[in-house]
Amino acid sequence: MIHLKIHFKAEFGLALYVSGNSKYLGQWNPKQAIRMNWNENDIWEVEVAYHEMEYKYFISQYESVQTILWESGPNRVTTNHAIDIWNYRKVCFQCLNPSNYEVYISGSPESMGQFQKRIRMKNKQGISQYVCQLDITDSQIQYQYHFLTKSEFSSPVYKLNLEQEQSYYKDALLVYQDGLAKVKQMLFQLNKNICYGYVPQTKEDYRTLKKFNLKTIVEFCNTQEKSLLEQQHQKDDCLHMIVNLYHFKQENFTQRLLQLIQVFIQKYKFIYICNNSLSHLRKYLQVYEKLSKCQ
């Protein structure tokens, strides 16, 4: 037998029903759905014969099904005992990770840290995975992946619409991302003036940047050479500048770096900064973003 439980405080005269795709659950006919049993603390439960099933809860009159209020979201699936929450779904986030990097996830819901903390994903057979319960009615869910290699890479912030998810992993809705394996070839936009990402090396790299209108490339280096502008060359209509920050090594390093970035923006309007050309670049850019908003 499969034991289903759900917490719901129903008004007097109403009851919770479960309907599904099998003969045991009425084959989606509400008139043949199973009325659940109420217990203390507003827990409704029922046992059904063991089978692989899709199901969903609805509210109707206790004595007979008349007016029907279905819960939101896609169908639930299970072959095991389930403790459910009205209008919530178990969601499984997966991303391809063949190199077995240390991967974290953060997001806007409380169960994903509200972007205040990162949650480590479990790695298994080249896949990183995290499972949590999410409110199906929340249309503003956002999330982001974070890869820790020798450097740190973060994906763009994605928006999730659970109403549209129709793939499953076991008893959870599946949110799968396979485009993150090449983390060193990802492009990110900080604001309307700055993008950042990998260092272009091939003609194809420059063509890709040009396609996104990223024609001014800034790559920072740290050598003992005296000149500030170490190199400047043109490739496929892209201006690639290598800037030496050796003599910036002092207490006001961050301030001078941010001033330099501002000079580039004033001159070129839109710049692309190479992500792995300066340690902790992303943190400096976040500081720049905060300072820009304060001005």
Image (cartoon, rainbow, N blue to C red):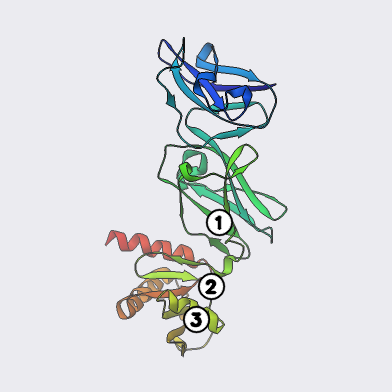
Q: Considering only vertical position in the picture, is 97 above or below 67?
A: below
Task: Give, as a three-letter code, the residue at label 3.
Answer: Tyr
Horizontal placement of 62 versus 185: left or right? Answer: left
Task: Give, as a three-letter code, the residue at label 2.
Answer: Tyr
Q: Earlier in the sequence, mark 3 or mark 2?
A: 2
Please identify the quarter of the rendering in which residue 70 is found.
top left
Q: Circle 1 is placed at which residue position?
A: 146
Q: Circle 2 is placed at which residue position?
A: 198
Q: Measuring from the top left, give residue 259's x and y in whole percent.
A: 35, 73
Q: Earlier in the sequence, mark 1 or mark 2?
A: 1
The tag on residue 230 is none
Q: Measuring from the top left, give residue 132's x and y in whole percent.
A: 56, 39
* Nearest to viewer (mark 3 / mark 2): 3
Distance from disc 1 to disc 3, alpha carbons, whole Å, reads 25 Å
Residue drawn where x is 51% and y is 14% of the image: 41
Disc 3, SS: helix
Distance from disc 1 to disc 2, alpha carbons, whole Å, reads 15 Å
Residue drawn where x is 49% and y is 80% of the image: 207
Q: Circle 3 is placed at which residue position?
A: 206
Q: Earlier in the sequence, mark 1 or mark 3?
A: 1
Q: Could you classify mark 2 by the number of other residues whose Cα lies within 10 Å: few (under 14), some (14-19), or many (20 or more)?
A: many
Disc 2, SS: loop
Q: Measuring from the top left, give residue 156's x and y in whole percent.
A: 48, 59
Q: Measuring from the top left, give residue 83's x and y in whole percent.
A: 59, 26
Q: Considering only vertical position in the picture, is 63 above or below 278?
A: above
Horizontal placement of 128 versus 237: left or right? Answer: right
Disc 1, SS: strand
Task: Give, as a three-letter code, the residue at label 1.
Answer: His
